[in-house]
Amino acid sequence: MAWRYCGNQVKLWRIRAGVSRESLGETAGYEYESVKSMEQGRRRPSLRLLEVADEMCGAQGLLLAAREYLKPERFPARTLAFMQLESEAIAFYSFEPLLIPGLLQTEEYARELMSDSCPPLDDETLAERVAARMQRQEKLRDKPKMAFGFVIYEAALRTLVGGPEVMRRQLNRLLEVGELRNVSIQVLPVGRGAYAGLSGSLVLLETVEHDRYALVEGQETSMLHADPERISALAQRHGMIRMQALSAEESARFIEKAAEEL
């Protein structure tokens, strides 16, 4: 709706000022159809278009004022409820079978990962989401009384996101964060018959009111559970995964060796 409203305002100001769509597009560096798409709200009006339209139409900043309402979402809509709960949590436990968990990612690893999104993200959305992921990580140190437990399947350590150098720095980040007193990082090696972990990623949260939630994610879906019976089953599954994983000390040695092998 913000796209449609802003685009319509550009159109109304353009018509009022007697500026053609072709002229606006030529000055802003866009094709006719691109300007049309932005005016109709099928494409997010760019800052460049707003700047040029504001000047050409004599809007005196009224069109530019819309830029604050057009910034891309820092998180996908399907994860916003979970992010709110995460910000209030006192305990966070996760299992990730294929990728390094977001709270542990380096900036370059996160950017490489998001750059390969399909369909691709535009540059502004990519920058916003990378920045949001880095900001999320501040809670690891800002909340020393919040417990974090991560179990990572070996496959995530072996997947060369961004190439060997990016991955080596990522593994070293795991070793660095794993030294924090409130953080536990465990590795689940391949070959341990950990079938409970093959169902996919899992996050368990506990809030200050001791309410418990679980997030289960798939390719294009995520499910946030609050039902006690369901939470209990998922917590048991996570407990089984942790028992099959290496200890934190063994995991640190495993990660260090994996980094040396790159």
Image: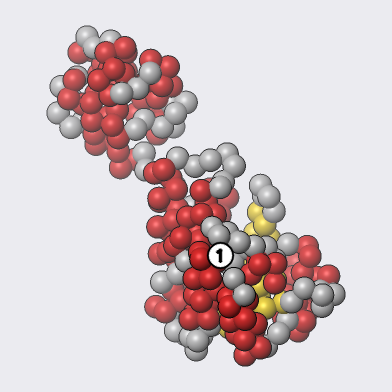
Secondary structure at numbered mark 1: helix
Local packing at callout 1 (Cα closer than 10 Å; few below 14, some 14-19, many 20+) is some
Q: Position of residue 169 (x, y in %)?
A: 49, 71
Measuring 51% from the left and 48% from the top, which residue is drawn there? 115
Reading the image, the residue beneath label 1 is: 164
Q: Which quarter shows the C terminus?
A: bottom right
Is 42 drawn above or below residue 129 in the view shown? above
Q: Position of residue 197 (x, y in %)?
A: 77, 69
Measuring 78% from the left and 62% from the top, which residue is drawn there? 199
Q: Is 82 on the left or on the right of 50, as rendered?
A: right
Q: Which quarter shows the N terminus?
A: top left
Amino acid at dot 1: Pro
Q: Is 114 on the left or on the right of 6, as rendered?
A: right
Asked whether the viewer can see residue 105, the reply is: no
Colouring chosen for the image of the structure: secondary structure
Measuring 39% from the left and 44% from the top, which residue is drawn there? 124
Camera-nearest residue between 112 and 76: 112
Q: Is 134 on the left or on the right of 224, as rendered?
A: left
Camera-nearest residue between 117 and 12: 117
- Extreme residue in the front direction: 261
Is 83 drawn above or below residue 118 in the view shown? below
Q: Position of residue 249 (x, y in %)?
A: 62, 90
Asked whether the viewer can see residue 110, the reply is: yes
Is 14 drawn above or below residue 170 in the view shown? above
Camera-nearest residue between 3 and 197: 197
Q: Is 197 on the left or on the right of 117, as rendered?
A: right
Q: Quadrant of residue 198?
A: bottom right
Q: Quadrant of residue 40?
A: top left
Q: Position of residue 29 (x, y in %)?
A: 31, 23
Measuring 48% from the left and 85% from the top, which residue is drawn there? 180
